[in-house]
Image (spheres, helix red, strand yellow):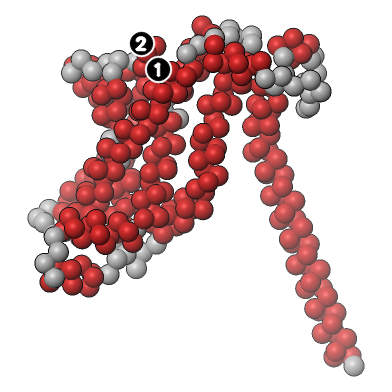
Amino acid sequence: MNTNTDIDRVERRAMWLERTRKTVVYALLALWALIVLFPFYWMLLSSVKSYSAYNAEHIPKFFTLSPTLQNYAEAFTAVPLAKYFLNTVIFTLATTAIMLVVIVPAAFAFSRLQFRGKGLVFTLFLALMMIPNELVIITNYVTIASLDLRNSFTGLILPSVTSVFYIYLLKENFEQIPNELYYAAKVDGTSDLKYLLKVTLPICRPTIVTVTILKIIECWNSYVWPRLITDNEAYFLVSGGIQEIRENGFGRENIPAMMAAVVVISVPLIVLFLIFRKKIMAGVARGGMKG
């Protein structure tokens, strides 16, 4: 009897410790989620407050009883926000498409083909990741300016059509495909291009989707390079357009209208991430596995 009692006591203590651990973990996660999501909530809340109501709040209020959509209407009338959206869509889609055409064959070559100096070339590729972005931007700017490509979509797109990190990610993923499958295809007379299109890409589709989505997010949020290479409003992107909105649109004081513009700009990326979040996580995890 004493033995059974001791066992029951130990089990109850273990269950109590497990419940306590889960409670603490979930409480910390909830606190962290609140900290992370609060800026988004405040942005959305501010965007539905009127200019007068916002300025009348000496102590910020965490709710409003009279929301308005007037700020969203002003976001599209004070500045050509729709034009910024169109420019960003063109820049994002063109850059992502060209990048995939460049990096997929490069990753396939490094992962499957045999040629002299492959290891050295790939090492030099990885070494490029160690170069500070500021130095790359300066070099790119000098090159684009010398080619007279400032204030053009070509100048915006060209420096972003490749990525050493994405080549490395795809190479690691391509190498997970068994070599026997490649050799069998070669025996059947399959060309490397056909093997890439018919075998490699379908198998590695999650990683391809992940790279595509990450590049879309990267292009949509691009700020430094577009602001550096364009000073013509006709080529402004949404990220750079925020500064134009602040300076020449609503003014520095109209915070609610600014927040409405930021919400409009942020919604496409939030929706994209929520739709493809599982594929993003699966693709990154798969790309990092070896063997």
Q: Are marks 2 and 1 in contact (CB under 8 Å)?
A: yes
Give residue 67's quadrant in the image.
Answer: top right
Residue picked out by circle 2: 232
Residue 82 versus residue 240: which sits nearer the camera? 82
**Which residue is at 59% across, 26% downward?**
263
Residue 183 appears in the figure: no
From the viewer's perspective, is 192 left or right of 64? Answer: left
Front residue (pair 116, 86): 86
Does residue 40 appear anywhere in the picture?
yes
Q: Which mark is residue 236?
A: 1
SS assignment at label 1: loop
Mark 1 Cα shell of 10 Å, populated few (<14), some (14-19), many (≥20):
many
Amino acid at the residue labelled 1: Phe
Amino acid at circle 2: Asn
The percent coordinates of residue 44 (x first, y second) are 66, 27
Measure the alpha-carbon separation of dots 2 and 1: 7 Å
* Residue 95 horizontal/vertical position (percent): 31, 33
Left-right relation of 120 to 30: left
Q: Residue furthest toward the right?
A: 1
* As drawn, 8 above or below 155: below
